[in-house]
Amino acid sequence: MTEMDTKVHFPAKEKRSWRAMVSLFSVLVLGIALTVIKFPILHGELKTLGEALIIAGVLALTVDVYLKTKLMREVGNLAIQSLFGANAPQEYAEFLAKKLRGIRAISLHNIYCVQIDRIEDGNIYKITYELRSELCNISTVHWDLVNPILPASRAPGEKSRFIEYEASARSPQSGLRAAKIRTLHFTESEHPEIEGAQTEKPGGMVELKRDQLKGFEKISIEPGGTASVRWKGEIFQPERGSLPIITRVPVLEFDLILTGSAVGQLNLTPYVGNEVVQEMGGVDSRVYRHRFMHSQGTVRVEWEPSPNH
């Protein structure tokens, strides 16, 4: 694939009824309540749900898709007053303001493709890991894509490495103006310098220094704009191991696809945090889906040899 186009479309402005606005605002208020109030049970799960509702409510309330400073202030103040009255605790107001300011971008949908194959000359698995992400800038300023990072290889003498990187940015639709699209695509075969543009970080993770690739140009996403990012790499792990995937922005939904010649030989368990992700099915692969994950959340796939193989 040489070009990646976003699937996100921004509708024209519509006049919303007061009932719809009340419903959307109620979603936002509920999300804030679940986030800031410490419930005696299920606090972690309710906090995560609250973060998802905050993002959904704010996105729906914004006319131009991205957050405007004035709207953030007005909605935040109104939500705090609705929850706690005129004498709302200042720490809650500050928490909400910080929470909304901190959300600069979200991922509308991530796809994690994990292909697991056994290397013939040892008890080592080669993991071909591919990430596809649909990002949206919901802030009021330009937002730059950052360098991707691969998880560390834990097999003795092996190192993770990138083999492909692709990114495209799309400006927001505005009236009759056509949305601008910029695309960059680098592969190991066409850009041999990709090997030297990789830096090992503490702990064995590997960062791709995109500015060292020939023809690279920084991609900056406009407020309300979107970006499609895809990159692929190889990771080498022992026969009993795991693959941690850390998100940098909130993810509204993701699919995890496990495939490869070794999948049928392993007991595989994917987690989000400490929660086991339920399998959705699949013919030649195992497919999992999860609805929301907050920033710096972790998807983790653990495996061990199946006793039947």
Image: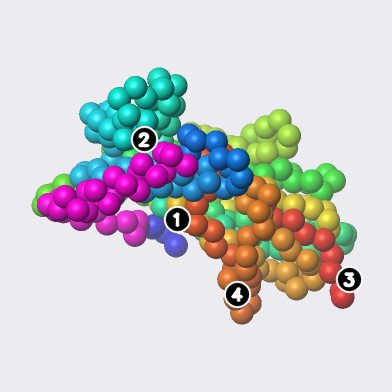
Name the mark on residue 101: none
Task: Please provide the residue range marked out in magenta.
Answer: 6-34
Tell me which label, 2 or 3, sits earlier in the chain. 2
> Residues under labels 1 and 3: Cα distance?
35 Å
User: Which residue corresponds to the image point at 87% horizontal and 59% vertical from the top-left?
Assistant: 123
State the residue position of label 2.
83
Q: Do the residues labelled 4 and 1 touch (CB within 8 Å)?
A: no
Q: Are marks 2 and 1 in contact (CB under 8 Å)?
A: no
For the rendered model, the colour scheme is: rainbow
Tell me which label, 4 or 3, sits earlier in the chain. 4
Q: Does the magenta stretch include residue 25?
A: yes
User: Which residue corresponds to the image point at 72% horizontal and 61% vertical from the top-left?
Assistant: 269
Whether 230 is drawn above or below 196: the answer is: below
Q: Does the magenta stretch include residue 287?
A: no
Whether 227 is drawn above or below 1: the answer is: above
* Amino acid at pointer 4: Gly
State the residue position of label 1.
109
* Amino acid at pointer 2: Leu
Left or right: residue 294 versus residue 246 is left
State the residue position of label 4.
281
| Image x and y of residue 217, in percent | 39, 37
Tell me which label, 4 or 2, sits earlier in the chain. 2
Whether 290 is drawn above or below 24: the answer is: below
